[in-house]
Image: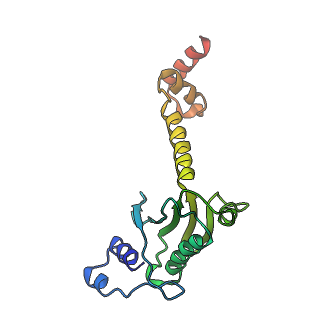
Amino acid sequence: MTSVLKAHLQLLGKDRNELAQTEPVFDADGKARIVDLMLSQRLPTSTDEERKHLVIELKRPSQPINEDVINQIKKYAKAVALDDRFKNSSVEWDFLAVSNSFTRDAELEAKQTGKPRGLVLEIDEPKIRVWAKTWGQIIDESQGRLTFFKRGLEYEANDVHALEYLKGISDEYLSDEVRQKISEMAAQ
C-alpha cells in the first residue's frame, strides 16, 4: 500500500523529497500490505485534475474468491479511506479482487440487492468502491460494452439521416435551404 500511496502522490504532482519521506501505509490490523496491480487514469475534464485509480488483487486460478479475499481487498480500501495522505476529492478509487470462481458465502456478498453485481463495499468520502469478480464476469461485461459500442458505430451518417434529425429541431434554427430540403424529402 505504501507503493500505491507513492504512485498516487506522484500523479498528483508531489516532488521527490516528499515521496522519499513517505511513511509506510498500514491496514487496520497494523500490517503493511502489498497490492498486485495499480492502474490510474486522468479523466478529461476542464481542470484535468480528476483521476481514477484501480487497485487489483489477482488470485491464482485455484484460489476462489472467499470471505478472506473479500476482507483482504476491503482492508486495502479502508487503509486508503482512513489515511489522510490519500484524501483528495478529485480521485475515485476502485479495488477489485479477481479469480476464477467464488465460494458460496462470498458469492452471496457479491450479489446484494440494489447494488451492481460484484460491489461489496462503497464509501462516499473519499469515493471508494470495492469489487469482487470472476474472470468470466469481467469478460462478459466487456463483451457487452463492446457490443453496445459496435452497434453505435454502425450508424451511417447521410443526408436522409441528417435531415430526419433536423426535423426534430425548432424551425427558428433552420435556414430556408434546409427547410426546403426537408419539405422535398417529406414529399417523396
Q: Quadrant of residue 67?
A: bottom right
Total numbered labels: 0
* Residue at far front of view: 62
User: Image point 47% across, 23% down: which residue?
Assistant: 158
Name the side, left or right, on which 80 lies relative to 121. left
User: Image point 56% across, 70% down: which residue?
Assistant: 69
Residue 132 point in image, percent of width and height: 58, 63
Name the side, left or right, on which 103 lies relative to 85. right
Residue 9 point in image, percent of width and height: 36, 76
Name the side, left or right, on which 112 lies relative to 39. right
From the viewer's perspective, is residue 132 above or below residue 2?
A: above
Examine the rendering and report whether any part of residue 63 can be seen.
yes
Name the side, left or right, on which 146 lies relative to 21. right
> Which residue is at the front of the view, 43 or 26?
26
Residue 128 point in image, percent of width and height: 55, 70
Residue 66 point in image, percent of width and height: 61, 68
> Which residue is at the front of the view, 48 or 148?
148
User: Image point 56% across, 67% down: which residue?
Assistant: 129
Q: Quadrant of the N terminus?
A: bottom left
* Residue at far top of view: 188
Q: Quadrant of the C terminus?
A: top right
From the viewer's perspective, is residue 1 above or below residue 111?
A: below
Q: Quadrant of residue 184?
A: top right
Examine the rendering and report whether any part of residue 47 can be seen.
no
From the viewer's perspective, is residue 84 above or below residue 108?
A: below
* Residue at far right of view: 113
